[in-house]
Image: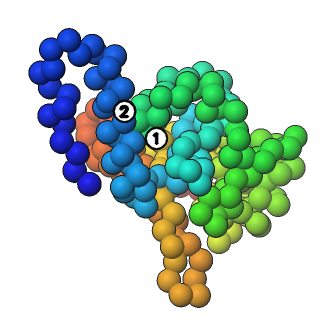
Amino acid sequence: MRVSRSLLRGRAGTSGRRRSRVRRGLRALERQAHREFIQAALVARGGELVAVRAADGTLSALPARQSKFELERWLEHDGDARAAKDVAKAKGFSCDGVGCVARVKGVVLAVAHHPSAIGDDCARAHVLVLDVPRPKGCEGAGTVIDFFDIWRNGTHALYIEPGTEGAGPQIRVETVAALRGDRPWSKVPERKSAR
């Protein structure tokens, strides 16, 4: 859906704040028109900042230290006028003392905050987010994003697409490093081989 941006130009007496609200509204309309192409989840800050998209299309995030700036950029990109503190109330997550779980488009996304949760989450979750290095044996059928994946590749965006007949949903992961490419000023650190 193409939305004409001519509404934003040349209106005498239109304040910058009003234009900003119009831009956010236009982005929200575009987002609704292309909902299937929007990230289902975003992971950053070493696995501490995790946001999922609720059924209504808005983001819900886990509270993370010093993440206000990044979360505000995600909301701005979405055309969402809510404050970061309102989004970081984890309404889309079910949490206990050792971790949080969210269900997005039929996919279980788990965020383990304690080592006791990792074993169960490795076995059951489609997507597991760890703010620690991935332990040995946690190479299950699902997608595992650990501290070093985020350190190496930056923010991860997860897209969940319906699977073919008989298969579950397909999870596609895009990272900042993959989209940025190999540049002299942004070398991707190489993984050391195990001896």
- Residue annotated with mark 1: 154
Q: Which residue lies furthest to the left in this view?
A: 10
Height in image: 115 above or below 158? above
Res. 24 mark: 2
Closer to the eye: label 2 or 1 = 2
Q: Classify residue 17 as left or right of residue 113.
A: left
Q: Can residue 179 be seen in this view?
A: yes
Name the foreground residue: 132 vs 6.
6
Residue at image position (56%, 34%) is 45
User: SS class of the residue under badge 1?
Assistant: loop
Q: Which amino acid does label 2 sit on?
A: Arg
Q: In which quarter of the image is residue 187?
A: top left
Q: Which residue lies furthest to the bottom in this view?
A: 166
Specify the label residue 26 is tagged with.
Answer: none
Q: Locate residue 42, reporting x and y percent.
A: 53, 45
Q: Which residue is drawn at 49% across and 47% down?
A: 156
Position in image of residue 74 (x %, y %): 46, 35
- The percent position of residue 83, horizontal first and vertical second, equals 55, 24
Disc 2 crowd rating (10 Å Cα; few below 14, some 14-19, many 20+) is some
Name the amino acid type tagged 1: Gly
Position above or below: 190 against 162: above
Screen quadrant of the N terminus: bottom left
Q: Residues within 10 Å of mark 1 (few under 14, many from 20)?
A: many
Q: Position of residue 31 (x, y in %)?
A: 38, 49
Camera-side residue of 45 and 189: 45
Q: Determine the residue positioned at 15% across, 14% down.
A: 12
Between the C-alphas of marks 2 and 1, the distance is 26 Å
* 120 relative position to 59: left or right: right
Task: Kindly check if marks 2 and 1 are in contact, taking CB atoms under 8 A apart as contact.
Answer: no
